[in-house]
Image (cartoon, helix red, strand yellow):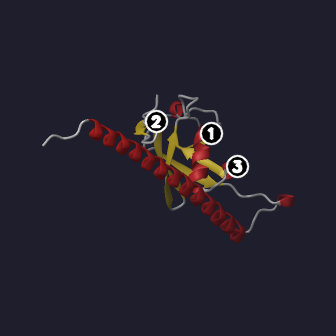
Amino acid sequence: MFNFFSLLNMSTGVVENVLKLVCSHGSKKYNVTLKCPEDSTELNCGHLFSAVENVTGVPENRQRLIFKGKSLTDAAQNLSEMGMKEGAIIMLMTKAIPCKDGETLTKEEEVLLTIDSEVEAKGRYLQEFTQNVMDFCQGLLQRCDCLTEMLNICPATV
């Protein structure tokens, strides 16, 4: 069973179960938050691959994720079966990009692709962040409307 962290979605008022991990890629560390999908009670490696791509920009087909010395290869494997808990550290290694005729990209080409991927990932992060802020503000506005309505119903006596 997972050690989930419960998070209250301010716009919907629903408590969501999330698992927060750390992804180490070279000298960089990324915070990865996995939300349990509505249609599932378990998180699997496929969910992790997708979340790591969103945070780091490294496409799933170039990821080699390692947890407790073992490479994660089966997208359907449940994370709880592997003993993954809140705060676990995942190591990300990137696979070389094959080109035509079995050649690989030069180091400069790989750096440019990595930068491009990171820019895309930051763009996705900013879109998600903006949506979360807007949801939060919407939730606050709804609460303010409720408070205003309550104050109008029960005026203070002096």
Q: Residues within 10 Å of mark 3 (few under 14, many from 20)?
A: few
Name the kind of residue labelled 3 in the image. Asn
State if disc 2 and disc 3 touch (CB < 8 Å).
Answer: no
Per the image, label 2 sits on a secondary structure element best described as strand
Name the kind of residue labelled 2 in the image. Glu
Q: Residue at x 42, y 44 (%)?
A: 139
Per the image, label 3 sits on a secondary structure element best described as helix
Q: Residue at x 59, y 40 (%)?
A: 47
Per the image, label 1 sits on a secondary structure element best described as helix
Residue under pointer 2: 16
Choose top left, top right, bottom left or bottom right for residue 70: top right
Q: Residues within 10 Å of mark 2 (few under 14, many from 20)?
A: some
Of mark 3 and mark 2, the one earlier in the sequence is 2
Tell me the CA gap for discs 3 and 1: 11 Å
Name the kind of residue labelled 1 in the image. Gly
Residue under pointer 3: 61
In the rendered view, tell whether residue 94 sits above or below residue 84. Answer: below
Tell me the CA gap for discs 1 and 2: 19 Å
